[in-house]
Image (tube, rainbow, N blue to C red):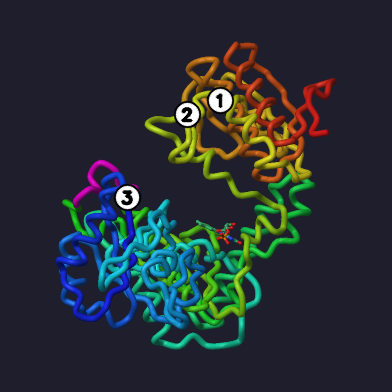
Amino acid sequence: MTLVLGIGLRSGTSYRELRDLVDAVLAGLEPQEVSQVVTVNGRESEPGLQRLAASLGAPLFTATKLELSQQPVPTPSERPGTTNVAEAAVLLSGAELVVPKRKSARATVAVGRFPHEPLTAAPGYAVGERDVVHRVLAERRDVRRGFLDRPIADDVLTRVLESAHRAPSVGLSQPWDFVLVRDLATRRKVHDLAVAQRDAFAASLPADRRSAFDGLKIEAILDTPLNIAVTCDPGRGGRHVLGRHADPRTTWFSAAIAIQNLWLAARAEGLGVGWVSFFEPGEVGAVLDLPAHVELVGYLCVGHVEEFAAAPELVRSGWAARRPLSWAVHQEGWGQRGLPGEQPSPVIVDDAAAAAGVVRAAGAQVVRLVVVEATDAAHLERAEALVVQVGGERPEADFGVLWRPARTIDEAVELGVEVARDLVLQGVGTIHLEVVSDSAVAAGLARGVRLGALACGAVTDEPGQVTHSSA
Ligand SMILES: Cc1cc2nc3c(=O)[nH]c(=O)nc-3n(C[C@H](O)[C@H](O)[C@H](O)COP(=O)(O)O)c2cc1C
């Protein structure tokens, strides 16, 4: 916690007088840092006040008379028409008043304490400016609808690309390039590729999920005046790119971050961006004539929009739900879940119970979860089946298999809870549980699935019996 000093003073008040007054007031408090001094507009040039702020190491801020007069001060000035600057300045800064106005001959001081927030968020950034950054992050959306028939001005686009191009990159390798695609014939070719992939994805879905997918729009390639293909040259920078040697994936991470920068900058310019990944990347590369060493990372549809939805389209349509932050934050090592300042929950079962009500299964999707020791191709042939492999080696990449190699039964329970919760977030309301393996670990994982599903209001049933219901 830090303190704020609100100070009112007559012109010519000496440093000594101010210092004595402030010292007397602070003497009654626990020693704490003064993070700012606030006064009324015009008094910031007073040498005594400037010296005081400098001696405290605190920046000096000002507020207008009008702003100050609007503060509900506890000790209004005795003289009508004059403002209690000291208290008003504290309140205006957002601090809680801890010492009401004290007077010397020519000055007044009041002290406030910031429970959380000072006027500045970081050197050079006012709190309001910080909040705008967080707002842009929260209000960025993947946009597929509502594009306006309005061209994008070159200066706007250049600003957006400059922000993208400022992204961090491993070893400053800057592996991205931006291919701006406006030509309708080119966009049609890319659109045809997306339609084909859409059909292929739809065909892979079980019937209930498919009908939900049919109502979703997944691209705006022809609805936007501009498409941007963001590419990655994995070899850029040569042999000794700093930081890439141990983890080559960092090159692609860098390109993805450039896309995020672009996305955020576009949001601030009123430009909607929709990322389309319904492609085999090489096919788009062929349409855009990318050299063989350059890879497609993201294909973006960009255009002006009137408004940005408050929540992701996949959330509004009920396709998927956002994952609570508390599920994603682990303290010191995997499994100690909890937000900063909270006692982490070491046992996911407790955590699962605590999560009840945070996420409620709203989806109608039914999934058949087959818990096996090692993958068996027979299970993979069923489109509605999701195989959870609790042992063995990492299976070949296949989204039909979740590899959850639990080392202990407790860990198996934890992983089971996570499996259930993640499925609920993807619209699953019912889990048919089939435990093929008879190992204790498989049983633990199945137990976790039941607990996780129960906490989120999903139904689990096992051949012949319904074990839990959301009712
Ligand atoms: C790598 C990546 C690929 C994506 N591909 C598609 C896509 O092909 N079609 C689509 O409609 N949305 C796509 N999205 C957008 C996501 O659906 C969207 O980001 C997510 O639902 C969250 O919504 P929000 O971006 O509005 O917060 C993609 C997003 C990312 C990051």
Q: Callout 1: helix, strand or loop?
A: helix
Residue range of the region highlighted in magenta in the rendering: 242-250
Asked if residue 43 lies left or right of residue 418, the reply is left
Residue occupied by mark 3: 250
Q: Is residue 177 above or below residue 471?
A: below
The answer to which of 445 and 398 lies nearer the viewer is 445
The answer to which of 350 and 254 lies nearer the viewer is 350
Amino acid type, residue under disc 1 in the picture: Glu
Amino acid type, residue under disc 3 in the picture: Thr
The answer to which of 237 and 337 lies nearer the viewer is 337
Amino acid type, residue under disc 2 in the picture: Gly
Between disc 1 and disc 3, the foreground one is 1
Asked if residue 154 lies left or right of residue 22, the reply is right
**Marks 3 and 2, how far apart in space?**
25 Å
Q: Please tell me which residue is depicted at 44% across the width and 65% down the height of the picture.
A: 91
What secondary structure is the stretch in magenta mostly built from?
loop
Quadrant holding ligand 1?
bottom right
Q: How many marks?
A: 3
Image coordinates of residue 264 in percent, x first then y, are 45, 68
Residue 104, quarter of picture: bottom left
**Marks 1 and 3, how far apart in space?**
30 Å
Asked if residue 73 lies left or right of residue 16, the reply is right
Q: Is residue 322 above or below residue 371?
A: below
> Which badge, 2 or 1, comes first in the chain's sequence?
2
Between disc 3 and disc 2, the foreground one is 2
Residue occupied by mark 1: 414
Q: Please tell me which residue is depicted at 28% across the width and 71% down the height of the picture.
A: 107
Q: Please tell me which residue is depicted at 57% across the width and 32% down the height of the picture.
A: 402
